[in-house]
Amino acid sequence: MSTDKNRATAAAILPLVGGPDNISSIAHCMTRLRIALHDRSLVEDAALRALPAVLGVVEDDDTYQIVLGPGTVARVTPEFEALVEQGRSAGHPPRTAVTPASAVSAVSAVSAVTAEELAAQGAALKQAQKARNSTPVKLFLRRIANIFVPLIPALIGCGIIAGLNGVLLNTGWLPAVVPALAAIASGFMSLIAVFVGYNTAKEFGGTPILGGAVAAIIVFPGVAKIDAFGQHLSPGQGGVLGALAAAFLAVRVEKLCRRWVPESVDALVTPTVTVLVSGLVTIFGLMFLAGEVSAAIGSFATWLLATGGAFAGLVLGGLFLPLVMLGLHQALIPIHTTLIEQTGNTALLPILAMAGAGQVGAALAVYCRLPRNRSLRTTIRSALPAGFLGVGEPLIYGVSLPLGRPFVTACVGGAAGGAFVGLCNQLGVAFGATAIGPSGWALFPLLDGPSGMGLNLAIYAGGLLVGYLVGFAATYFFGFTRPMLTELNADQEPIPATAPPATEPAMA
């Protein structure tokens, strides 16, 4: 039955994005079906948002993203891919955009010159928006995210198993199972550098297996016999940062070889030179440098939360939603992964998750302040369950961001929740998440720390409660001006979701 439901969702989405021939690529992340389109004008946004399974839509300069939620997107995507393939093989013609009658009459009422001028203005505006969203920093961070996001399902699964193993170890239950669970939970993390190297080479246009081969040097036990910079190397030194740098170097070397090596010997020379040159640089340079950077990141995060936890939590929790809007949150992904690799968890994620709590509190306040706006209240009711589970896009792009002030007050709620969790870290109750990706209530199974599961859960729950309450209060009392209340407190059409700059799953 669930397969039929997922297929029905995919079948409902496909014609609304222009049909099979309008799609150039398909992918998905934790919550979104991401498709690249040939003709954006063929997409029917309003009809897509009206589908029961669709939580929202987001557009950046590369892809059109349909928010389906965790779990659902992983099941709908294969069905969607199958339908696209069937449609292409059947030779269905691409759909054409339908011009409403009102638009036809409006166009006929103006001259051809005016229509051309309007088209030119529209193209210029679109190009300007794309230029704003396609800064080198954002494009680079998006590529970094593309390397790490495919690893999130394994991080989540192994993180939950590690948490379960910790419970069994502390309680003394099933002692024979503990070593097996430890091996299952740790196996992926011991080789995560290889997967990072593989994805890095794939993302930057190299041969993926060569990137993985060079990155594998970092985790090879034999490097312990090698001296570099006056000290013995240790397996895993440099971690994911070293793997990323090594694989990127391998891509550059491979491309140089492809350019200069004759085709007759390319199959022999290029892989050999790529692995040899990149491997030597990795062993005698990148492992040491990346290890120093990784150690500095871990030390700084520990120091920051231990000495200024409340203030750090206030800043991180308050600014995370704006970082998501700017696409800059993707810079945190390798930092989270490095902390998990070093200490077993990332203490930053529970703090950043408070931004979602402030968002939920703000949405509840909007619901209470606009009792006569039935359409907006319906939107909030449908989006709140996803918001509690850490999927914030429907509330952000469908409620708070279009309204303006409630987005700011949601950030205030996130700051308060972050300050609470940060203060507890400062007082010595340190904990973190064993994986990245989930947020909200979905983060509970992934919490880990030396203070014990009960205290970790209680503090995280307390932070969420603070975020909910402060986000609600700030929005209820300061989220609306009198003209806004007069205009909005009536039965209206749902507020359309705005298309943000390029963003990725909130990771919090």
Image (tube, grey):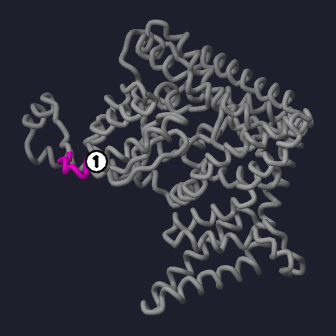
* Residue 409 visible within the image: no
The spot of residue 488 in percent (x, y) is: 43, 14
Q: Amino acid at mark 1?
A: Gln
- Left or right: residue 48 compared with residue 189: left
Q: Quadrant location of residue 296?
A: bottom right
Specify the farthest residue to the front: 176
Specify the farthest residue to the top: 372
The spot of residue 323 in percent (x, y) is: 60, 43
Residue 255 vs 445, above or below: the answer is below
Residue at 42% over, 30% down: 54
Residue at 33% over, 49% down: 126
Q: Quadrant location of residue 234?
A: bottom right
Q: Please tell me how crowded label 1 is: few (under 14), some (14-19), or many (20+) other residues with Cα within 10 Å.
A: few
Element marked by disc 1: helix
Residue at 18% over, 43% down: 96
Quarter containing the C terminus: top right
* Residue 147 visible within the image: yes
Quarter containing the N terminus: top left
Residue 361 vs 414, above or below: the answer is above
Give the total of numbered labels.
Answer: 1
Residue at 77% over, 81% down: 284
- Residue 87 within the segment the image draws in magenta: yes
Residue 453 vs 385, above or below: the answer is below
User: Which residue is labeled 1 in the image?
Assistant: 86
Q: Quadrant location of residue 386?
A: top right
- Left or right: residue 160 compared with residue 356: right
The spot of residue 269 in percent (x, y) is: 54, 89
Front residue (pair 152, 467): 152
- Left or right: residue 263 compared with residue 256: left
The part of the chain drawn in magenta is 86-94
